[in-house]
Each structure stands twice: as structure tokens, then as C-alpha cells.
Amino acid sequence: MTKLKCIVIEDEPLAAEGLEAFIREVPSLEFVATFPDALSTLELMNRQQVDVIFLDIHLPKLKGLDFLRSLKNPPQVILTTAYHQYAIESYELNVVDYLLKPFGFPRFLAAVNKLMANDVQSKIELAPAVNRQPSTVNRPNHFFNENKRQVKVYHDEILYVESLKEYVKLVLLGGRTVITRFQLGEFETQMNDPNLVRIHRSYLVAKDKIEAFSATEVEIGGVKLPIGRVYQGQIQF
């Protein structure tokens, strides 16, 4: 199994040690190094492959989000921070997940599941064009506003939709994400797609993309999503 090479950018020694320990617990991840600030990583990133950055936001010399914006071809990024107010801004930079400190291993593992799902989907996108998506003719689609531009999303690209309060995050085939200003209920009404099913106050899922489910969770795109208590027993997949 090819492991994803991970670096940690974190100026708090205890937090950095905790992340290193978590990474070493996951067989699909390989810990490479820890850096106390973002600028210190540049030499390593220029000479060897880095697949994942666990990135703090409040760093000395250069803030985490400014560092992320400076990268032309950034690897996958999971933010680790004690500050919740940067969540929307960070998702617009296509981070994989946003871990609020303090977090435990189960929450870390949930972020890694999203990471692995993105990695699998990106490999599918790069594979030879066998069993590709059907012709775009007559494929239902919507345009969504993201960063002052209109982005086309085909309905059959959607894996699941996650509520971010005033925004929603569309997780699509190929590891793409789109962040747009909608509440989840408004989005559900706008799409009017019977294939999109509400399983939780924070999640809609595409029925035809579900890989496995139980009474309490759904697995889709390699990510496990909870089924809310009020929806348990009512959903038909």
C-alpha cells in the first residue's frame, strides 16, 4: 500500500507531538517531519513529495492561510486550529477538513477518511477513460456562485452535501468541492432531486453513490457520515 507522506506545521510542541502520534497510528499515512512555521517547510517541499499538510492557522512569520494561498499546486491540507471563525474562508481554499482544537483521535480519523476518499477519487480521475461519466447532453445541472464566479455542477457528480451554517459544501466525484451560500434546506429545495436524501440535519447524500449503510451511518466516497436520530428508520436507500 502506498502511504500518503504527511508533514505537520504547528508551533505548539505538545500539539505537534499529538499530531505526529495520531499520524503514526494510521497505516495509510507516513509521518515525514514537523515544522514550527510555514516558511521552514519550503526547502523540504521543493526536494521531496508531500501529499498532506496538517496546518495550523496562527503561525509565526506567515499565517497558515496566507501560506496556503502562496502554493501554486498545494497538496491536500487539513487545518488544525483553536479558532472557528476561519472555517468558511478555509473551505473556499479547498481544504479537506477543519479540526478544532482540542480534538481526539476519532475526529482526526474522520478527517483522514475524507483525505483517503479524495485520494481515491483523484486516482480515478487520472485513470484511462473507461466507464467515464455519460455524455453531458441532457445531464441535469446547476450553476452555483463560488468566489464571485458561476460554477457548473452536474447532479450526478454529487457524492454528498455538508451544511456549513450559511453555506453548503458540495463534495463531488474526482475529489472536487464547491462552497456556495445556501442553507441546506434551501439547497435541497433548489435541487429538487429525488436522488439526494437528507440523512442528518447537516448532510444530504446521493442514494446511488452509497457504498454501505447501517442504522446509524452511511458510507459514501470512503467517508462515514452519521444518520440523525430523527431520520433513523425513515430513510429508504
Image: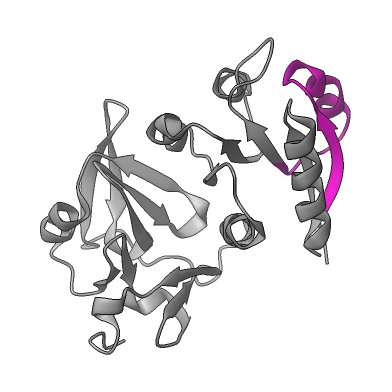
- Relative to residue 31, is residue 127 depicted above or below? below
Q: Is residue 158 left or right of residue 125?
A: left
Is 151 rendered above or below residue 147? below
Can you see residue 118? Answer: no
Res. 139 in view: yes
Viewer-side residue, 136 vs 226 = 226
Give me the residue at 60% from left, 23% from top.
Answer: 64
Image quarter in which the C terminus is found:
bottom left
Q: Quadrant of residue 52?
A: top right
Type of colouring: one colour
> Which contiguous range is marked in magenta?
30-52
**Camera-nearest residue between 78 and 170:** 78
53 left or right, relative to 169: right
Residue at 80%, 24% in the rendered image: 41
Toward which corner of the image does residue 210 lie, by quadrant?
bottom left
Residue at (30% x, 84% y) in the render? 232
Residue 44 figure quarter = top right
Is residue 147 toward the left or the right of residue 84 in the image? left
